[in-house]
Amino acid sequence: MLKKIRNYLAIMIVVCLIVTVAVATPIFSNADAIEPTATIEISKVDKEFLVEDPATAAVNSDASISVDLLEETLATTDVVDLDDSNDVLTYLASPSKIKELKLFRPSRVDNSQSKYFPPIMDQGTLNSCTTWSTVYYQMSYAVNKALDRDAASTENVFSPSWIYTMVNEGENYGNYYADILKVLSEIGAVPMSKVPAITEVNGDNVRNVMASKEMWLEASKYRVDEYYTIDLKRNSETPVVDSPKDEDLDAIKKSLALGEVLTGTTYSYKWNKTKIKEDKRVKENSKYKGQYIVTDCTGSVKGAHRITIVGYNDNIWVDINENNVVDKGEMGAFKIANSYGEKSDNKGFVWMAYDAINRVSALAEEGSTINPNRDAGIFDVIGFNIAVNDVENDCYAVLDVTTNDLKSLTVKVTATSDDGKKKEYEPAPFTNAMIRGMGAYPFNSSEDGANGEFYIDLSNIVENVTKDNVDDYEWKFEIASTSQQNESVINSFKVFTKQDNNYTDSYVEEPITLKNNMADITIAKEPAGYLALARYF
């Protein structure tokens, strides 16, 4: 398992110069007319990365982070653990639906047949399966379902590539799903009609971070509001599932029956597959004759792969132990959508036998030893609820920068209320907030590629903040460059309110150069009731 990149340890040394200057305009539109002041200091930042060497790391492992780390990584988004089917019903279903599912348990569900589910596509040669499964399949489906839209249009499916370039360090690396979930919850997703998918390395396309007002505000319409996890007991040394009626399947099956689409991690290089055979003892098999089904995940080659779980069928049979007996432990399978194109397996889908979820097969002979090369077929299962066209995310800090080293940029936001309580927030996609974030490159390779702007949503730290209540807090923005080689320049720093499409004047009167140092922009509420600005660089 890849190690988590730890947040940096910054040692700030105040070195000298203090200057006081006047700023011509109020900070927010509802601020008093008293002019704020600015103080300027110089701070130095030291940073130590505790990170694997990409040359030796398993960079093809797209999903090597435990669900246990989600709450730490997704500091601004709730993560709910659904331990059993009752939790699922309470969390996902309306009272009438709860009653319906208690009385009737469907033996088969296939949400991929819905108009909301996107067409199968191919990730190509990029290690981007986590963005395909989570952004393209899962997020598109969830939003389309909420808005009753058809996934056939590129306007109604989300681009995996817009997020991929923010979470791959500028290389053809695999991603951590916690990073992608963080971007989806704090920033959002943009349609493929605006950012077409990339499927192979072509020049610097994997480093093309599209950081513009259009993209940030479009993404803000579609966000994840809350995540939930379903535990399939990956590390159990005894069989978890021994029949389609096993209660350990209830939570995931009820989620699917309620119309959810889930994502999970698997070791696809370990998949052992066979074809479903027609058998007069199992009528359902005739419908799926010749389709591929994963019987187990056993092998020495590891490489985590993120897939999308779209349905299940309790009535499919595969003869796992090849004894020509229809054992109850051989019945049932999940339907999985993959990102390998329509030419793979069953036109881009594949079945996975319930028994393949077991680290120890329910068909294993009594007394047999645990196979160290066998893994659970699916683990780290994630679902989410979405927020569509959220008008509450109204106030943004807008950071306009010029840089050839996006990876070196870190941002920390602190909001302090009148009673002295502080809220701290490290926003995506900056390096200190991510496990694997942007690369040590400019935004893109164009002539103007070093220039871009970030819209940091302040509602991620203070819920429902607007231009009318934003001055109830003191705001502090610590913007740093950890590079000793490359300079980054803050060209301007403004506050934008979406509901009236209005910007404040820049709080940076002259460009601030960052090189292993930090700019501290503080918008402070003074006792007299006006707002003041402090800048450090």
Image (cartoon, rainbow, N blue to C red):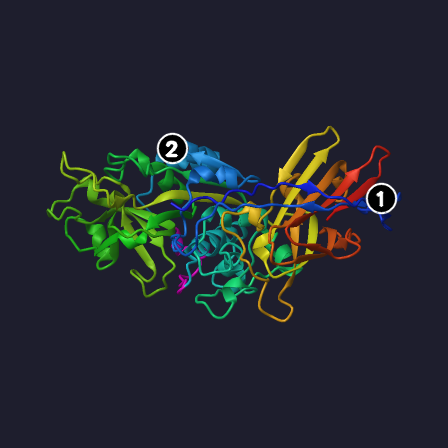
Quadrant where the N terminus is found in the figure: top left
In the image, taking residue 217 as reference, residue 284 lies left or right, namely: left
* Residue stretch in magenta: 111-125
Q: Give the image location of residue 397, x and y in percent.
A: 70, 49
Q: Amino acid at mark 1?
A: Pro
| Res. 470 image quadrant | top right
Q: Which residue is mark 1?
A: 36
Mark 2 or mark 1: whose residue is earlier in sequence: 1
Relative depth, front residue between 510 and 377: 510
Tell me how many marks there are. Answer: 2
Q: Give the image location of residue 50, x and y in percent.
A: 49, 45
Q: Secondary structure at mark 2?
A: loop
In the image, taking residue 22 as reference, residue 58 lies left or right, namely: left
Relative depth, front residue between 423 and 261: 423
Q: Which mark is residue 84?
A: 2
Residue at position x 65%, y 58% in the image: 487
